Image (cartoon, rainbow, N blue to C red):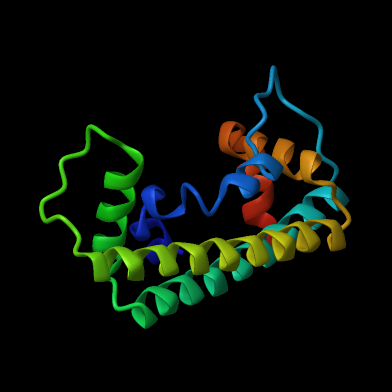
Amino acid sequence: MKKFLCIGVVLLIAATAVYAQDFSSPSLSGPIEVSDGELRQFVTALQDVEAVQQVVQSEMIAALDDHEISVERFNELYQAQHDPSFDITTPASQEEQDRFALAERDLQGIQQEGQAEMLSAVAEGGLDVERFNQIYVALTQDPNLQQRIQRMLQ
């Protein structure tokens, strides 16, 4: 998953628009109650989601390789296309622009398929996406919840 993060937010901005909608981070006004059973469902779903993310990451990198565009160059071209103030180091040739467009289309398709699989993984785990997100946000804010999950994973 670390390599996925190295690909960068820029690579995934367009590709994750729907994912962000479905897995948006709700804000919590205070601690939430999470039963042990629900926490087990969350852990299982999270592991499944992470597995899907790893596959998606590999497929995205392979798609860029197929189009002969490095992750870094894709990110640069993407940012230049979507941010008029971005100063691109080397302008793209027409051939590179064409490969970029095809790669971007492929990445969006891969991400959409991945999103469906992630949503399915959460649902199959017995949680709805909203509750999954609530628990996830609580996990980032609640050390006690973090400890409970760590004990479950041991």
In the depicted structure, whether residue 111 falls above or below residue 143:
below
45 relative position to 109: left or right? right
131 relative position to 94: left or right? right
127 relative position to 25: left or right? right
**Residue at 66% in and 40% down:** 21
In the depicted structure, whether residue 51 falls above or below residue 28:
below
- Quadrant location of the C terminus? bottom right
Residue 11, image quadrant = bottom left
The residue most toward the front is: 94
Return the x and y of residue 130 as percentages of the image width and height: 78, 39
Return the x and y of residue 102 as percentages of the image width and height: 43, 69
From the viewer's side, name the closer residue of 59 and 138: 59
**Residue at 57% in and 68% down:** 110
Residue 135, image quadrant = top right
From the viewer's side, name the closer residue of 68 and 41: 68
Return the x and y of residue 4 as percentages of the image width and height: 42, 62
From the viewer's side, name the closer residue of 69 and 120: 69
**Residue at 46% in and 47% down:** 13
49 relative position to 72: left or right? right
From this viewpoint, is residue 47 visible? no
From this viewpoint, is residue 23 visible? yes
Residue 75, image quadrant = bottom left
Return the x and y of residue 42 as percentages of the image width and height: 76, 53
In the depicted structure, whether residue 84 falls above or below residue 147:
above
The residue most toward the bottom is: 66
**Residue at 81% in and 39% down:** 34
